[in-house]
Image: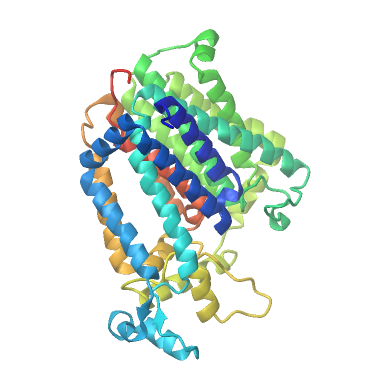
Amino acid sequence: MVLKKNLLRNIFLIIIALCVSFNASNTNVLVQLSSIYFITFFLLCLKNKEVLEDIKKNYFNNKIFFVLFFIYLIYLIIQIIPLPLSFFKIISPINYELYSSIKIDKKFWSLSLNPSNSYFKILNIINFFIIFLTFPVLFYRSKHLMRLLLFLCLLGFCHAVFATYWMLIGNPSNFLIEKIHYLSSSTGLFVNRAVFGTFLMLCAFSGLYYMALFFQKNEAAKMDLFEQIKSNIIYIRIFIIFLTIGILTTWSRIANFSYFLILLSSVMYSKISFKKFINPFSIVILFILVFDILILGMIFGNEKLVDRYIETSIVSEATRISLSEFGFVYFKKFWLFGYGSGAFGSVYKLFYDMPEGLMLAMHAHNDVIELLGEIGIVGSLILILTIITYFKKLIQNINQGREFLRFFLISSLFVILFIQSFVDYSLHVPGISIFLAVILSSALIQFRKINK
C-alpha cells in the first residue's frame, strides 16, 4: 500500500505525540514501541517512490552529516558487541580490571557496562536518524512546518491543562508513574517536573517559531482579531498562556529559567529582524512575560518559585553536585571509549559507596558529564564533528530571511538547552530527545515554492 505525503505527515504527527506523551517514553518497553513506530513509518515512506527519491536527495545534499551520524551509531553498536576478555587489556584496562574481579565464568564482555540499556539508547538514536532523513522530505514548505509547529504547541497545551488539573487534586498515582515526590507540582504523565517543564518549553518554542514564521512571511505590522483567528495566531497565544501556567507550576527552577531565556531570545530576534521593536510578535512575548510575573504570580503564588531560587546553595544542591563529581571521576576512568550509553546507573551501583537507604541514581544530573562518561573521548569527537557539520548546514544561505530565522532560533535553543544540561538530565529522556530531534531536523529543510 502506497501512502500519499499528506497521510505520511499525519502519521508522523501521531507517532511524535505517542512517543513524547506517555512517561516521555522513559521505559524500555515504550522505547521499543517508539522504535517500532518509526521503523514502520520509514518503511511506509520507502514504498512511496516520490518520497524515496526525495529521501535520497536529502541524504546526498547532507551526505557528510549523515555519514558522521551513521559512524556515531556504529560506534554505539561497537560498545555492546561481546569481545574476548583479553582484548580489554589493550583497549580498556579499567574494563579488564573490573571484569577480571567478577567471579563469573564468562569469556566475552562488552565495552558497555550495561549493554541492555545501551541497546535501547541505540534504538532511540536510530529514531533520530529516521527523523533527520524523512522530516525534511515531508515538511518541505513553510506551511507544512507551520502545521507541525501548531500541532506541537497544541500537544503541549493539552498536557499543560491536564497536568495543572492533576496538580490541583494532588497528582494521583497512575499505572505509569508514581507521584510521591511531586504532589504539589505539575508533572502530568512525565517522570518529574524538570522533564515536564522542558517538554512544555519546547512546545512553547514551537509556538513562538510558528508566529515568527507567520510575521516574517506576511510582514504584518498589526492584526485585528479576525486576522488572528484566520491565521491561528490567537490560538497560539492561548496555548502559550496555558503552557506558561504549566511551566510555572512545575516549580522547576531550571525549566522556568530556560523558558525565560527562550522568550528573551525571541524578543532579541524580533528586535533584529523586524523594523519596529514593538510589533505583533514582540507584543505577544512581552504580554507573556507580564502575564507570567503579575497575573500568574497572584493566582498560583510566584513566591514559591522565588523561594526555591533563594534556597539554592551548594549545601542544598550537595546531592546533585556529588553525582556530577562522581560522573566526572568515572568519565576520567573510562575516558577513551566510555562505559556505555544508559550505563550510569550500573557505574553508580558498582563504584559508589551508597549509605543504607539511599536510592540508586540512574543519572548524573548533568547531561554533559553523563554523555562524556557514556561515549568517552572517541564518541565525543565523532559527535562534535557531527554537530559542527549540522551547524555548517544551518548557516548556509544565512542572508535569506527564513534561513536567518532558523539559524537564530535553533542556535538559541541549542545554547539554552546546553546551559540547562549542566544541572539537568532531561535530554537523556527518550521522548524529550525525540522532540528535540524533530525541531533540529528543520535545519535540513530546503523550502520549495511549488506544490508536490
Any part of residue 27 in sight: no
- In front of the other: 183 or 37: 37
Q: In this rendering, does residue 351 appear at all?
A: yes
Residue 193 place in picture, x, y as percent: 61, 50
**Which of the 4 quarters of the picture holds residue 399?**
top left
- Residue visible at 36% across and 32% down? 48
Pinpoint residue 251: horizontal percent, then vertical percent: 63, 47
Relative image position of residue 445 (x, y in whole percent): 31, 33
Q: In front: 403, or 103?
A: 103
**Residue at 27% from the left image edge and 44% from the top image edge:** 391
Q: Is residue 87 left or right of residue 106?
A: left
Residue 144's quadrant in the figure? top left
Q: Residue at x 52, y 80 (%)?
A: 350
**In the image, what residue occupies the spot 36% across and 85% down?**
85
Q: Is residue 354 left or right of residue 230?
A: right
Relative to 305, is 342 on the left or the right?
left
User: Is 64 located above or below residue 425 in the figure?
Assistant: above
**How far across and how far down the image is residue 31, in percent?**
52, 53
